[in-house]
């Protein structure tokens, strides 16, 4: 039937959508789904006895498209990458395709059932026709011969021949001949219905054959596309390997210091910019190395100026040393004064030691006092505990007295319970008496401890008196120390004069250091430029030869001629008249 063909077409449409992901494939799926519903509805109207079964088949087909395969169809439409397409195809195989198998089996079973019914109907109709012929023959046996012959030919041409033709068509159709023409489809009787049913079988077979051809074609296209993708991927990897190898060779030459290397072989279009950037970087680095060679000369010149300034600074340092000798003499006088001050400090130390001994004894007395007070505190705490016991006894006595009254009232004349309560009351009274005795003893002990504390406090007062006497002696010693401090002040005045002379020389040195700093800044700037560009590379530029620097040597006579005053704002240039022929042998290590 055509519905079976439509179901196969829907499965093929989903597969085509997964492979091509085109709008046409989605539209074909919608059309085949609509045709599936239409054909089943038409079959249900033509075959009322099978309407319920056909509706069940229609419901199964709708659930496949609208529920079981809905997610797969949506993912196939939304897929934009190869990974998503492969994932959707796997989802179709695992979750969608298994749903078509039972539906297709049900459709095949229903088609077989309808075919059997058609065959049975044809056989019954043929048997009924034979019976009708026999009855007609018996009824009209006495009729005219021409009527019998006419009736025979009429039945044969109207019923028997069409059924035989239909049977032959079905046999050819079952044998695989899909080009057979089904006659009698325009008839309005049962024969016409059977012919229409056979026509449906024929169209279903044709659609199935067409679907198989489309499926094979789609699989062939997918295989071609996969081969093309694999070839493109192989070409891309080869281009990428060539680019990586070329860059690796260039970096290897760069690591060896060769800045003249260039990438001359053309890259693929997407990597051509990388080749240009690499060559441009090599050119820039080569030019930078040339700048480094030129900056080296400036660094050497700055080093010579710094060396000359350092010689001048050394001469001024000698003068500063003379001033330091005067400072040392003044410091000797200060040392004698400090020694006397130290002797007074020693005497003061002895006095302080005596005062410390008295203070220690006072501390011991205070410790004893604290111990006594602690004993008083402990006794007081025990008194509080005993008083608490007495309170508890009083409370219990009241309760027992109450219980005794209750028992006496309950027992009446017997009074046996009252005797028990009276016994407990006597025991509690005894405990109260004992506690009172303990309180008395503790109070007596506390009085003794308080007396001891008073005595110790008196001794503490005497010790403090002795400490006062020692402090008075310490005061006199402090006066002597003050006199020594006056003598130290005189020595400090001499030190101050020497320091003033040192300050003058230091100012001159500071001026020279300022000039040295200026030259150092220039040297640092050149050195930073040199450090940023430093490396030994092979370039196409001619490397400048280092120019000899004049050796700056200061003789003893020249040093004696250097005046002690603030230098000018510029360095004195070194004469080349007598030393131009002596090349400089100093290098950076000497500097």
Image (spheres, rainbow, N blue to C red):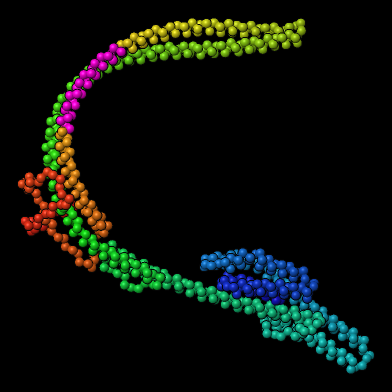
Q: Quadrant of the N terminus?
A: bottom right
Left or right: 28 as drawn, with respect to 496: right
Left or right: 166 as drawn, with respect to 528: right
Residue found farthest to the right: 142
How far across and down, in percent of the image, does residue 157 sit? Answer: 81, 89
Observer-nearest residue: 312 or 424? 312
How far across and down, in percent of the image, does residue 198 sit? Answer: 73, 80
Q: Which residues are magenta?
A: 467-496
Left or right: 161 as drawn, with respect to 327: right
Figure check: 162 above or below 591: below
- Can you tell which quarter of the image residue 109 is in? bottom right
- Can you tell which quarter of the image residue 564 is in? top left
The residue at 70%/85% (across/down) is 180
How far across and down, in percent of the image, does residue 242 sit? Answer: 36, 70
Visible residue check, residue 313: no
Q: Is residue 473 on the magenta stretch?
A: yes
The residue at 45%/14% (across/down) is 374
- Can you tell which quarter of the image residue 574 is in? bottom left
How far across and down, in percent of the image, does residue 522 sit? Answer: 22, 54
Visible residue check, residue 378: yes
Observer-nearest residue: 139 or 224? 224
Q: How many marks?
A: 0
**What secondary structure characterizes most of the magenta part?**
helix
């Amino acid at each position: 039937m055509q519905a079976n063909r439509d179901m196969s077409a829907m499965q093929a449409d989903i597969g085509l959508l997964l492979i091509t992901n085109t709008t046409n494939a989605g539209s074909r799926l919608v059309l085949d789904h609509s045709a599936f519903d239409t054909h089943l509805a038409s079959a249900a109207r033509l075959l009322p006895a099978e309407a319920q079964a056909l509706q069940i088949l229609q419901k199964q087909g709708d659930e496949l498209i609208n529920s079981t395969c809905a997610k797969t169809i949506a993912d196939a439409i939304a897929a934009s990458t190869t990974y998503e397409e492969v994932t959707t195809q796997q989802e179709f195989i695992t979750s969608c395709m298994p749903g078509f198998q039972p539906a297709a089996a049900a459709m095949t079973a229903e088609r077989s059932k309808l075919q059997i019914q058609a065959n049975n109907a044809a056989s019954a109709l043929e048997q009924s026709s034979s019976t009708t012929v026999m009855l007609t023959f018996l009824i009209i046996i006495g009729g005219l011969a021409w009527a019998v012959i006419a009736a025979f030919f009429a039945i044969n041409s109207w019923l028997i021949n069409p059924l035989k033709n239909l049977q032959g068509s079905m046999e050819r159709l079952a044998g695989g001949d899909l080009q057979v023409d089904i006659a009698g489809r325009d008839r309005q009787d049962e024969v016409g219905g059977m012919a229409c049913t056979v026509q449906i079988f024929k169209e279903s077979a044709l659609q199935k054959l067409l679907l198989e051809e489309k499926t094979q074609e789609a699989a062939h296209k997918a295989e071609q596309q996969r081969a093309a993708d694999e070839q493109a991927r192989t070409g891309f990897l080869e281009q990428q390997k060539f680019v990586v190898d070329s860059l690796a060779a260039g970096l290897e030459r760069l690591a060896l210091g060769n800045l003249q290397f260039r990438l001359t072989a053309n890259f693929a279009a997407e990597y051509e910019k990388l080749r240009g950037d690499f060559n441009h970087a090599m050119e820039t680095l080569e030019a930078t190395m040339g700048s480094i060679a030129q900056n080296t000369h400036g660094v050497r010149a700055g080093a010579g100026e710094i060396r000359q300034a350092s010689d001048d600074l050394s001469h001024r340092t000698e003068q500063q040393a003379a001033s330091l000798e005067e400072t040392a003499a003044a410091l000797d006088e200060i040392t004698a004064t400090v020694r006397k001050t130290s002797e007074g400090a020693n005497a003061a130390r002895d006095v302080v030691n005596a005062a410390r001994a008295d203070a220690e004894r006072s501390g011991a007395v205070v410790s004893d006092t604290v111990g006594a007070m602690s004993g008083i505190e402990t006794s007081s705490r025990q008194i509080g505990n005993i008083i608490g016991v007495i309170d508890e006894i009083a409370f219990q006595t009241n309760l027992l007295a109450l219980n005794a009254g209750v028992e006496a009232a309950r027992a009446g004349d017997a009074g046996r319970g009252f005797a028990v309560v009276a016994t407990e009351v006597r025991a509690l009274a005894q405990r109260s008496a004992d506690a009172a005795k303990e309180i008395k003893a503790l109070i007596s002990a506390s009085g003794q401890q308080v007396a001891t504390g008073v005595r110790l406090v008196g001794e503490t007062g005497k010790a403090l008196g002795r400490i006062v006497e020692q402090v008075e002696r310490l005061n006199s010693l402090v006066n002597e120390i003050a006199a020594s401090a006056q003598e130290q002040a005189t020595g400090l005045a001499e030190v101050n004069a020497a320091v003033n002379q040192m300050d003058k020389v230091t100012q001159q040195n500071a001026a020279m250091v300022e000039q040295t700093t200026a030259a150092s800044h220039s040297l640092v700037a050149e050195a930073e430029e040199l450090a940023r560009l430093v490396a030994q590379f092979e370039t196409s530029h001619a490397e400048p030869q280092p120019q000899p620097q004049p050796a700056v040597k200061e003789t003893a006579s020249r040093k004696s001629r250097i005046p002690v005053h603030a230098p000018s704002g510029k360095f004195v240039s070194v004469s080349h008249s007598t030393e131009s022929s002596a090349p400089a042998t100093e290098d950076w290590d000497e500097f």
